[in-house]
Image (spheres, rainbow, N blue to C red):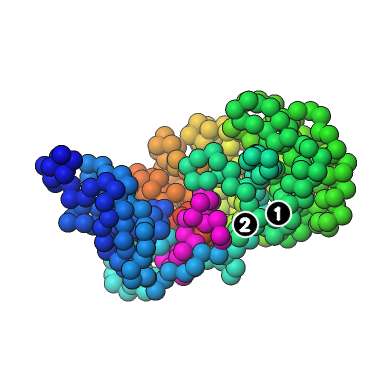
Amino acid sequence: NMVGENMKKNIPVIKNEQYVVNIDSSGYEGEGIGKVHDFTIFVPGAMPGEEVNVKIVKVNKNFAFGKLLNVITPSKDRVEPMCSLYKRCGGCQLQHFSYEAQLKLKKQRVKDCLERIGKLSVKSDEDKRNNDNAVILYDTIGMQNPYNYRNKVQLPVGRKDAEVIIGFYAKRSHEIINMDTCGIQNEESDKIINIVRSWMTEYNIEPYDEQSGNGIIRHIMIRKGFKTNEVMVVLVTNKRELPSKDELVQSLIENVKSIKSIIQNINTKKTNVILGEECKTLWGNDFISDYIASFKFNISPLSFFQVNPVQTEVLYSKALEYAGLTGDEIVFDAYCGTGTISLFLSQKAKKVYGVEIVQQAVENARINAGQNDVENVEFIVGESEKVIPRLVEEGIRADVVVADPPRKGCDRKLLEAIAAMKPRNVVYVSCDPSTLARDLNILKSLGYAAVKAQPVDMFPQTAHVETVVLMSRKEK
């Protein structure tokens, strides 16, 4: 009597049945959205403008999920995914979109969030209408080559039957998919993974088993300096002893010339945190280096560094441009991390104050500033919403505030503290359009108008988008 039940609730689809669906828009993860008799169906893998055959796999009160069986009329933006594991791997979401279409989708997502969540009016930069209250939204800045851009990869190691497997987790699971090649990580990674896999097989080195807690090798992490071409290999082990390590080191340095550092990281805890606290250098240096613009950064196994340094430079240059500095300003960087944006801003500011709650990140930031001979930056450990009022009391007021918060956005207390400091401009760097829009709406109520927004594609082939927004103080 399932059908009768469904009809009562006005649900026109039945689980496990097939339907033809016209897809008219995309969701946040790039999934297709269509309707059957006005009832919303989400179809991963389907694209706007397509007519598709779908099998319903899950029915909720207001919407259902469908599995894409086949595409009847494909979108002109549909391309063949370059990776054979694309459908199973959880790493990318948009490989079936042409790159042009990916960039448009990301701009559209920012626009939707700004309008729906931020309650802002949005206009494109071509729009000459005199709507002064509208924020100008530019086209997403993409990459020349939207592949092999990741300078860091962390891969779980496991076993399937008798075979050592190293790869990515499948979508929403802890099943490891053995990987030969990945289109978004640096080219050396494939080669390094294969060397480690053969070494483990040849010398009977056991992969870690999550269930029992036995075995030795948990993860492999590879980091690369794109401008220096230096590569670091980190083996995360469940034990202090690493048998046959000399054979592995030999094999790695003979076959991959760019390796500058091979490190063992020890993590004996039963946890899904990848890295342990302790590192032992097996060969080479304790760190590698890379540059963002002209600034040099040391990267050790545990230190944070932007995953796509090429686009980070684009993003930070835009933030610097939006800050509108002339050389006389005091600038406040509210989530400074290891100081990357602070150093960028220091080029055109009189003084930059960087605030960060993580002690270790601040120590790194100070080293980074010293290494680049930057003297007009001061780093403070603490929460910005507490530090700002203290600075104001000491008579220090920022002309410009830059905030680059984590995915959950800014604390409301922080936004209030920023507004109370009355900076001329606030530059918001965001990795999540929905929390960005929520915060812009709060800043609007505190007297700041969004002027312009620039999406940047930091993670091609995935659904993520970064945005830089300039907000200016409205004169009362």
Label 1: how many residues lie within 10 Å, few (<14), some (14-19) or many (20+)? many
The label shown at residue 400 is: none
Q: What residue type is labelled 1?
A: Ser
Residue 380: where, in percent of width, then height? 62, 35
- Depicted 11 relative to depicted 266: above or below: below
Residue stretch in magenta: 83-104
Q: Nearer the viewer, residue 112 or 79?
A: 79
The label shown at residue 189 is: 1
Q: Who's the residue at 74% across and 40% down the image?
A: 235
Residue 393 visible in image: no
Which residue does the numbered mark 2 point to in the structure image? 182
Q: Which of 451 and 115 is in front in this view?
A: 115
Residue 316: where, in percent of width, then height? 57, 57
Residue 317: where, in percent of width, then height? 58, 60
Q: Distance between the residues labelled 1 and 2?
A: 8 Å
63 left or right, relative to 340: left
- The kind of secondary structure the magenta stretch mainly shows is loop
Q: Are marks 1 and 2 in contact (CB under 8 Å)?
A: yes
- Depicted 69 relative to depicted 233: above or below: below
